[in-house]
């Protein structure tokens, strides 16, 4: 979004664009996103237009290279055709994954539908214990409040089980002491954390760092953490199949699910 605004409104944009010879577009599957897709498409189209302009014929952008990367896009040929006739497509199937991916679908009988989210949160810790093999786990929820409440429920059920190792307890104690969010700090001391856009940048950095270092056993998060953040989870739990977007609930797309699964 910043690059889009810069290239459209800044007077110095033309001279900066002329010096660009490589554009790497990570998470290019976002072209299909209803809110961000049009902006990304406009940026790529604008770069291609500048590359073909007679005014930049002697500039680096005249030999512009576009590289698009995604782990969850199906129509590679369509993207390649849009990039241009000389586009090379490299496709890697699941055989290239460093860790095999297996799927499990679990369900429970629920008689009170308006307590659906609460009931799901109540089952999370048991699911994690049954499948995590004492390895790092990420749990995705469909809202900020659900992620925070989910972490609280997991921490309550876990008690002190997740921080029995002295080294882990000490490391998480240090991280918790640096957190501005007291709710998050209390969860961290019990081996659980939550992550969403409502946290401060520093708190998010601390939580991500603790999980990446193997110090935080369970991380409860919103779907946003699945976009472009590489964290080493052995188990991923999707606690919902839809989320509230633009005035209504919408089912997760196949792309969303694959992004969360890693």
Image (cartoon, rainbow, N blue to C red):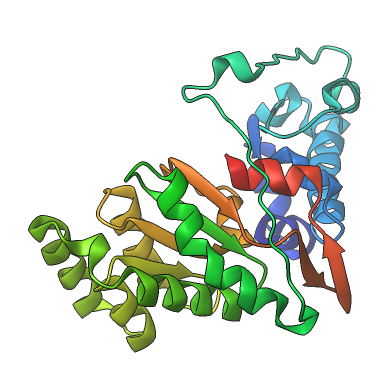
Q: Quadrant of the N terminus?
A: bottom right
Percent x, y of residue 16 = 64, 47
| Rendered residue at 11%/65% (across/down) | 170
- Where is residue 155, by image quadrant? bottom left
Q: Is residue 235 left or right of residue 159?
A: right
What percent of the width, then of the height, locates residue 229? 51, 49
At which x and y percent is residue 150?
51, 73
Depicted 181 relative to depicted 80: above or below = below
* Residue 181, quarter of picture: bottom left
The residue depicted at 87 percent of the width and 53 percent of the height is: 38
> Residue at 45% across / 48% down in the picture?
130
> Nearest the camera: 31 or 161?
161
Q: Is residue 200 visible?
A: no
Residue 105 appears left or right of 169: right
Where does residue 31 sit, x and y in percent of width and height?
Answer: 82, 45
Residue reaching furthest to the bottom: 182
């Amino acid at each position: 979004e910043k690059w889009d605004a810069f290239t459209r409104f800044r007077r110095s944009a033309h001279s900066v664009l002329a010096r660009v010879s490589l554009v790497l577009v990570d998470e290019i599957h976002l072209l299909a996103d209803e809110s961000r897709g049009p902006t990304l498409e406009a940026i790529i189209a604008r770069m291609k237009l500048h590359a073909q302009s007679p005014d930049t014929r002697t500039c680096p952008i005249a030999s512009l290279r576009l590289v698009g990367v995604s782990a969850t896009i199906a129509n590679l040929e369509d993207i390649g055709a849009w990039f241009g006739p000389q586009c090379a497509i490299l496709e890697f199937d699941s055989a290239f994954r460093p860790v095999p991916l297996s799927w499990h679908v679990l369900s429970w009988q629920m008689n009170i539908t308006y307590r659906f989210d609460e009931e799901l949160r109540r089952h999370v810790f048991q699911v994690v214990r049954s499948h995590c093999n004492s390895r790092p786990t990420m749990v995705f929820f469909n809202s900020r409040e659900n992620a925070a409440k989910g972490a609280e429920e997991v921490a309550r059920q876990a008690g002190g089980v997740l921080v029995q190792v002295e080294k882990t307890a000490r490391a998480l104690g240090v991280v918790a002491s640096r957190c501005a969010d007291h709710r998050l700090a209390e969860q961290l001391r019990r081996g659980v954390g939550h992550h969403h856009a409502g946290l401060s940048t520093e708190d998010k950095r601390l939580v991500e760092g603790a999980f990446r270092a193997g110090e935080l056993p369970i991380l409860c998060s919103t779907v946003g953490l699945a976009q472009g953040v590489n964290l080493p989870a052995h188990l991923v739990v999707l606690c919902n199949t839809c989320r509230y977007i633009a005035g209504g609930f919408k089912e997760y797309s196949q792309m969303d699910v694959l992004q969360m699964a890693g």
